[in-house]
Image (cartoon, helix red, strand yellow):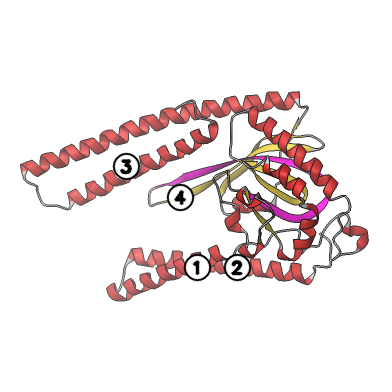
C-alpha cells in the first residue's frame, strides 16, 4: 500500500478521514436510539452490547490506521519538498513567494479556506508551485476540514496575451474545472483530439483560436494528456494532482516547454482584429480574455435552497415553532441571497466585457 504514488496516498487519506467520522456518527446515532428505548430483555441487551463493542473497535482500528497513515503522508510530503528544492537548485530556479495563477484556478478556491501556494520556484521562462485549499464543514460541536485539494501548477511565459482556452484532460480523472465553464463554450476539434481533451474557448473567438490550435500543436498537446492545460492571458499553465518528485517537476518542464515552443511559432502573426491594430498583436479584447462562467450550478443551488426554505416554512406553520426549522430558514435565505448575488455579478461582468469588446485587456 505504501508503495502507492503520492496522489493515491492523498486520496486514500481522504477515504480514511471519511470512514472515521462516518463510524463515529453511526456510533452516536445508534447510542441515541438505544437510549430512547425501554429496558431491553437480557438477550437483546447482550446483542446491543456486542454491536456497540464492534462499532467501537472498528472506530479505534480505523482511527489508529488513519493516524499512522497521516504521519506517513506527512513524511512523504516532506521528502517531496526536499526533492523539489534539490531539483529547483539544479535547474537554477529561484524561490519566490507566489506565482501568478489563472482565474480558473482561483475560482476553484473561491469560498474555500487556507488557500496558499507552496514550493514556489521561478525562472525567466517558467515557474512551479503547489497550490492547495480546504473545504471546511461546521456542525453543532466543531469546525473541521472536510477535504483539502492539492494541485501542482507549472506556468510558462508567453510573449503576448491570448484568448482564454482550457483543455480539460479526460485522462486525469477529474472534471473540477470543466463544470465551471459555460457549456456553450465547448468545442470539438479534428481527429481524435476529443478523446484526450474537452476543449473550452469563447464562442466569439472560434476562428481566432483555430488559427493557432493547429493539428501539429494538437499532437504536442496530446503528449501531455494527463494534465489539464490552460492558456490564460500571457501564460501557459499545466495542472495536475501532486505526484512523486522529482519526476513530476521534470515531466511538467519537458512537456510545457515543448507546447510553449510550438505555440509561440503559431501565434507569431496572430492579431485580435476587434481592437486597435497597434495593440492587437500584444493582447486581446476584454471580451475574450476570460472564459464565461457556468451559471447552471448557481441556479441548482438556488433551487435547493428554495426547496429547503419552503419545507422549513411549512414545518413552522404546522408546529407553530421549531428551532431547527427556524435555523433552516435563516440558512436558506442566506444561501438564496448569496447565489443570486453571484449570478448578478456574473451577468454584469459579461455585459460589461461585451459592451467594451473593442478595448484591449
Contact (Cβ within 8 Å) of mark 2 with mark 1: yes
> Which numbered disc flags the more N-terminal residue, 4 or 2?
4
Q: Quadrant of residue 43?
A: top left
Disc 4 target residue: 137
Name the residue tied to disc 1: 302
Q: Mark 2 vs mark 1: which is more N-terminal?
A: 1
* Camera-nearest label, 3 or 4: 3
Residue 212 visible in this rendered orientation of the protein: yes
Say if the magenta span includes residue 63: no
Label located before the other in sequence (4 or 1)? 4
Q: Secondary structure at mark 2?
A: helix
Is residue 358 found left or right of 201 in the rendered image?
A: right
Disc 2 crowd, CA 10 A, few/some/many (<14, 14-19, 20+): some
Callout 4 secondary element? strand
- Nearer to us: label 4 or label 1: 1
Residue appearing at x 75%, y 49% in the figure: 215
**235 is higher (above) or lower (below) than 3:** below
Please identify the residue farthest to the bottom as the structure is shown. Answer: 317
Which residue lies under the disc numbered 2? Answer: 343
Q: Locate residue 312, reporting x and y percent.
A: 37, 69
State if disc 2 and disc 3 touch (CB < 8 Å): no
Q: Residue furthest right?
A: 278
Query: Do the CB atoms of the residues marked 4 and 2 lie less than 8 Å apart?
Result: no
| Segment tinted magenta in the rendering | 142-168
Task: Residue 162: say if magenta.
Answer: yes
Q: Which mark is residue 183?
A: none
- Quadrant containing the C terminus in the rendered view: bottom right
Which numbered marker is on residue 23? 3
Asked if residue 308 lies left or right of residue 234, the reply is: left
Q: Main secondary structure of the magenta part?
A: strand
Q: Nearer the viewer, residue 316 or 87?
A: 87
Front-most of residues 350 and 29: 350
Amino acid at each position: 500500500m505504501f508503495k502507492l504514488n503520492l496522489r493515491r496516498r492523498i486520496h486514500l487519506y481522504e477515504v480514511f478521514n471519511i470512514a472515521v467520522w462516518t463510524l463515529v456518527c453511526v456510533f452516536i446515532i445508534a447510542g441515541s436510539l438505544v437510549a430512547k428505548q425501554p429496558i431491553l430483555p437480557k438477550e437483546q441487551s447482550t446483542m446491543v452490547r456486542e454491536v456497540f463493542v464492534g462499532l467501537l473497535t472498528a472506530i479505534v482500528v480505523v482511527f489508529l490506521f488513519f493516524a499512522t497513515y497521516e504521519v506517513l503522508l506527512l513524511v512523504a510530503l516532506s521528502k517531496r519538498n526536499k526533492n523539489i528544492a534539490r531539483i529547483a537548485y539544479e535547474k537554477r530556479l529561484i524561490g519566490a513567494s507566489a506565482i501568478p495563477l489563472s482565474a480558473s484556478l482561483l475560482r476553484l478556491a473561491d469560498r474555500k479556506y487556507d488557500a496558499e501556494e507552496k514550493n514556489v520556484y521561478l525562472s525567466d521562462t517558467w515557474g512551479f508551485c503547489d497550490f492547495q485549499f480546504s473545504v471546511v464543514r461546521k456542525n453543532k460541536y466543531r469546525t473541521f476540514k472536510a477535504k483539502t485539494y492539492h494541485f501542482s501548477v507549472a506556468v510558462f511565459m508567453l510573449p503576448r496575451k491570448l484568448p482564454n482556452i482550457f483543455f480539460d484532460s479526460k485522462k486525469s480523472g477529474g472534471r473540477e474545472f470543466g463544470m465551471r465553464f459555460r457549456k456553450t463554450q465547448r468545442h470539438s476539434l479534428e481527429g481524435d483530439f476529443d478523446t484526450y481533451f474537452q476543449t473550452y474557448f469563447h464562442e466569439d473567438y472560434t476562428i481566432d483560436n483555430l488559427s493557432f490550435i493547429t493539428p501539429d500543436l494538437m499532437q504536442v498537446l496530446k503528449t501531455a494528456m494527463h494534465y489539464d492545460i490552460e492558456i490564460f492571458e500571457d501564460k501557459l499553465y499545466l495542472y495536475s494532482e501532486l505526484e512523486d518528485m522529482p519526476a513530476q517537476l521534470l515531466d511538467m518542464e519537458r512537456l510545457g516547454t515543448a507546447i510553449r515552443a510550438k505555440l509561440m511559432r503559431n501565434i507569431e502573426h496572430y492579431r485580435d482584429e476587434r481592437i486597435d491594430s497597434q495593440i492587437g498583436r500584444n493582447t486581446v479584447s476584454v471580451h475574450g480574455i476570460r472564459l464565461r462562467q457556468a451559471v447552471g450550478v448557481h441556479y441548482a443551488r438556488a433551487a435547493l435552497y428554495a426547496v429547503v426554505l419552503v419545507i422549513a416554512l411549512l414545518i413552522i406553520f404546522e408546529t407553530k415553532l421549531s428551532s431547527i426549522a427556524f435555523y433552516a430558514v435563516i440558512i436558506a435565505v442566506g444561501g438564496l441571497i448569496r447565489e443570486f448575488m453571484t449570478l448578478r455579478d456574473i451577468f454584469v461582468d459579461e455585459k460589461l466585457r461585451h459592451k467594451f469588446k473593442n478595448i484591449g485587456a
